[in-house]
Image: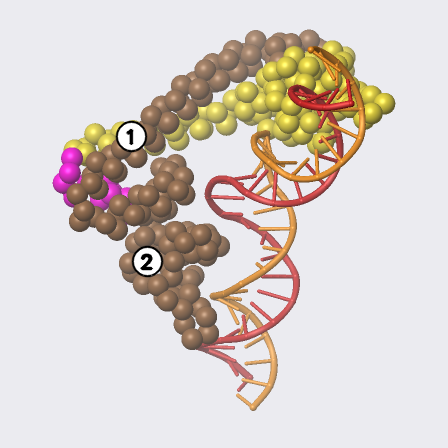
Chain colours: A brown, B yellow, C orange, D red
DNA sequence: CCTTGACCTTCCAGTAACTGGAGAGATTAG
DNA sequence: CTAATCTCTCCAGTTACTGGAAGGTCAAGG
């Protein structure tokens, strides 16, 4: 499977697949005689794994960790480690949600109190300045 | 006022103040004989304005726009323009909130269903892979 | 056999918004 | 006078890609 087929199968842009190979996250298992990266189903599964993990907001380094656990699945520590990483990420999401909520409320209040007409006085500017 | 005094007054790191000067966002009104950036109260107010706007998640380019409006406060269009920019930002926040909520729910479900013990089977890995 | 177009390669540069550090000059306190 | 603390500029690195140039490869059509 050439890179474009693999990228379609994984749901990632070709550039990204090449990038993941460059940073040794998911490498092509081999190269063709002319140097083309050649992917197999296992590599595609890893790419899908990384795509999904990225969609969950895991960083590349976290993906690398998770991928390591994914590949070592027969070892004992797997489940506990994965849960730890996912819980950490969940906590980050919850913090971000709170921040976003405060931000939302403050900005919504400002927008609501601003008439938005042609008058020069503006509560948003007044607050920010 | 030298840069470190200005940065303290504005609540920004020195490096950031210098950076804002470099990109012509908030320049030092003048330089000392030996080339030190010299700030006055007006410049500090602008730095505070930018800091607050950044805390609201406005991009540097949006800050530039808002700062332009802030400085032209006597012109008519100010209030409507500011409200437009702030409303756009509010809509972005709301989209982000929804995304974060879906993410949160999905990940929370996975974390909850994972026993996190020493068994090798892990629903999180199963889902991602 | 040749050409055309789609594909592939590497490498370089740019994105956003800083942050860190080197190397060198200025200022201030003791 | 010296040591510590500023300050300056410039360069590089961060994250996770993305875009593009220059050039090699491959399959199909004429």
With A44 as the anchor, is B39 left or right in this view?
Answer: right
In which quadrant will I find the C terminus of chain A? top right
Disc 1 target residue: A87
The quadrant in which residue B113 appears is top left
Q: Is residue B63 visible?
A: no
Kindly identify which chain the residue marked by label 2 belongs to: A
Image spot of residue C30 (x, y percent): 69, 11
- Label 1 lies in what chain? A
- Residue B121 on the magenta span: yes
B65 or C8: which is nearer to us? Answer: C8
Question: At x 53% / y 16%, what residue is drawn?
Answer: A107
Badge 1 crowding class, 10 Å Cα cut-off, few under 14, some 14 to 19, many 20 or more, is some
Q: Is residue C7 above or below residue B83?
A: below
Q: Position of residue A70 (x, y in %)?
A: 26, 47
User: Image check: C7 left or right of B18?
Assistant: left
Which label sits on residue A43? 2
Which residues lie in the magenta part? Answer: B117-129
Residue A32 appears anywhere in the view: yes
Q: Residue at x 42, y 65 (%)?
A: A37
């Amino acid at each position: 499977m050439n890179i474009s087929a693999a990228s379609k199968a994984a749901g990632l842009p070709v550039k990204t697949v090449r990038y993941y190979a460059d940073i040794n996250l998911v490498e092509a298992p081999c190269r063709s005689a002319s140097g083309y990266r050649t992917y197999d189903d296992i590599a595609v599964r890893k790419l899908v794994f990384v795509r999904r993990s990225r969609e969950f907001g895991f960083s590349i380094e976290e993906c690398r960790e998770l991928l390591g656990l994914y590949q070592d699945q027969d070892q004992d520590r797997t489940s506990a480690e994965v849960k730890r990483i996912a819980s950490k990420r969940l906590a980050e999401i919850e913090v971000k949600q709170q921040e976003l909520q405060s931000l939302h409320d403050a900005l919504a209040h400002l927008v609501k109190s601003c008439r938005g007409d042609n008058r020069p006085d503006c509560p948003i500017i007044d607050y920010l300045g």
